[in-house]
Amino acid sequence: MLIPYQCGDGASTRGSGRAPAYLKERALEQELQVPEKAIRWHDTQLICSDVQAPLIEHEILKMIKSLDDKRVVNLINDLRKQTVIRSNIMLKEHCLQAISGGYFPITVGGDHSMVGSFAASVIAHEAYEDCGLLWVDAHADFNTPKTSPSGSLHGMSLAILCGLGDEDYKSLCANRRIINPAHVCVFGARDIDETENQLLQKNGVTVITMDEINRIGLDEAAAKAIETISTPTYKMLSFDIDAMDASLVPSTGTPVKGGFDECIFETISVFKTLGGFIHAAFAELNPTIGTPEEVDKTYELYKRAIKSII
Ligand SMILES: [Mn+2]
């Protein structure tokens, strides 16, 4: 079941919250249909934080922020955090509903601040500490408010799942560590902050960088990732479209050069054969960035990423 996360407030570039509405318009649901499985949207109203606060407002906020008055910056960050938390409470509820209806939840963002979706699956399956997490992303999303250069919550989501970071944000995870960092593999990263890297190492997260993948090859890198995520009973996939090379996915907020090409979809299909997957999430398609052709190009790959796990 496709579950929309209509929030882009976790990112400094807004607009990804509009992706679910765009995906509906593009008839993603129909395009994903496979013979033996019924794919459908979770029946929710489309309430997008990016629609509630139009992009023009975002531009004004950016200007105010550039005045660099700490009080204003804190106020803006706090407002955005509240939106992220509210959106996640809704998302978590929708995921729980899907799971109790016997569906496999596929969260479609929105930005990557969608921790409520992963929390819902771990809670529903009582999979605390017994869930491998494959984080396919150009970034590690392992910052905390102390280490983050931007303060954006989508860069802190993996840390939150591992029990580190902002207390309010952590409340979405039943105030506990829901994923053991030893069971996490960040796959394809190539833009990690220095303090973030220290935190990843300290917590024993396996990071397979793009450099390493280029060196040892995708198959060997995948085997290494499997070693990390296959021990636990359950597994989840988190796919950030910016894992793909920047030239292939122009419509995303933080593109990074030197990423995956389409071979990654075959690799995800290999991961899938491990079994035990209880959740998949797809983030950071931003239909407000780029020309219609660029959005279309990014959409096609986003759709193929989802197809590879179905
Ligand atoms: Mn991400």
Image (cartoon, rainbow, N blue to C red):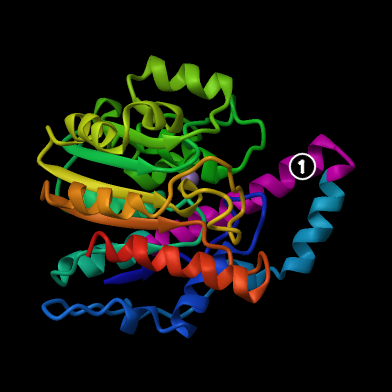
For the C terminus, the quadrant is bottom left
54 part of magenta stretch: no
Residue 17 coordinates in the image, percent (x, y)? 55, 65
78 part of magenta stretch: yes
Number of residues whose C-alpha sits closer than 10 Å to that of mark 1, classed few (under 14), some (14–19) or many (20 or more): some
Examine the rendered structure and indicate whether residue 13 appears above or below residue 195. Answer: below
* Left or right relative to 256: residue 237: left
Occupied quadrant, residue 303: bottom left
Residue at the extreme right of the image, as rendered: 67
Examine the rendered structure and indicate whether residue 268 appears above or below residue 106. Answer: above
Q: Which residue was labeled with disc 1?
A: 73
Element under disc 1: helix
Q: Does any atom of ligand 1 lie closer than 8 Å to the CB of label 1?
A: no
* Left or right relative to 138: residue 294: right
Residue 158 coordinates in the image, percent (x, y)? 41, 38
Residue located 60% across and 31% down the image = 148
Residue 27 coordinates in the image, percent (x, y)? 41, 84
Q: Which residues are magenta?
A: 66-91
Q: Amino acid type of disc 1?
A: Val
Occupied quadrant, residue 179: top left
Question: How many numbered discs, if any?
Answer: 1
Residue located 61% across and 43% down the image = 152
Residue located 54% across and 73% down the image = 296
* Left or right relative to 186: residue 220: left
Residue located 58% across and 59% down the image = 8
* Left or right relative to 224: residue 282: right
Residue 28 coordinates in the image, percent (x, y)? 38, 78
Work out whether residue 301 or residue 99 is closer to the camera in this orientation and state it.
Answer: 301
Work out whether residue 301 or residue 98 is closer to the camera in this orientation and state it.
Answer: 301
